[in-house]
Image (cartoon, grey):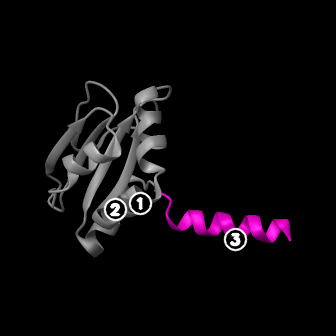
Amino acid sequence: MNRVFLILVLGIVSLYSFEFKTYDEAIQEQLKNNKIIMIEVVRSGCHYCEDMQEDVFEDEEMSKWLNERFIPVQINLDNEKLPLDVEVSFTPTFYFINAKKEIVKKVPGAWNITDFKDLTRKIK
């Protein structure tokens, strides 16, 4: 009984989770739905990156809001290369990429839910 309950709870939580895709997966999805790709550039051990994950991306309402608007990609500079010859000064930094592979907005730093929503609301 407890096992069934746990599986049910995990299933419901996963409906609202913020799941990052690879850049290649995001490109394929963008061809189908023309959404903006949101790339979060991180490094291992970056506590600001961890704050964004815990405070913003793990929030159920915010995850749903972001998933409706963007295709999320996370690139760790410790073991991945950035696409489009992008250079990063610090992490986290967010790049928003349209279907023409153009950067339509860059948002450096870590933010709370309200501020991040305000910074990304008009990106189309």
Question: Which label number is shown at residue 8?
Answer: 3
Residue, x 40% and y 63% (percent of image)?
64
* Residue on which the image places disc 2: 65
Dominant SS of magenta comes to: helix
Q: Nearer the viewer, residue 71 or 86?
A: 71
CB under 8 Å between discs 2 and 1: yes
Is 16 within the magenta? yes
Q: How many marks?
A: 3
Q: Which residues are magenta?
A: 1-17
Residue, x 43% and y 56% (percent of image)?
21
- Reading the chain from its start, which is encountered first: label 3 or label 1? 3
Secondary-structure class at tag 2: helix
* Residue on which the image places disc 1: 61
Which three-letter amino acid code belongs to the residue tagged 3? Answer: Leu
Q: What percent of the width, then of the height, locates residue 94?
A: 27, 41
**Residue lying farthest right?**
1
- Reading the chain from its start, which is encountered first: label 3 or label 2? 3
CB under 8 Å between discs 3 and 2: no
Is 15 within the magenta? yes
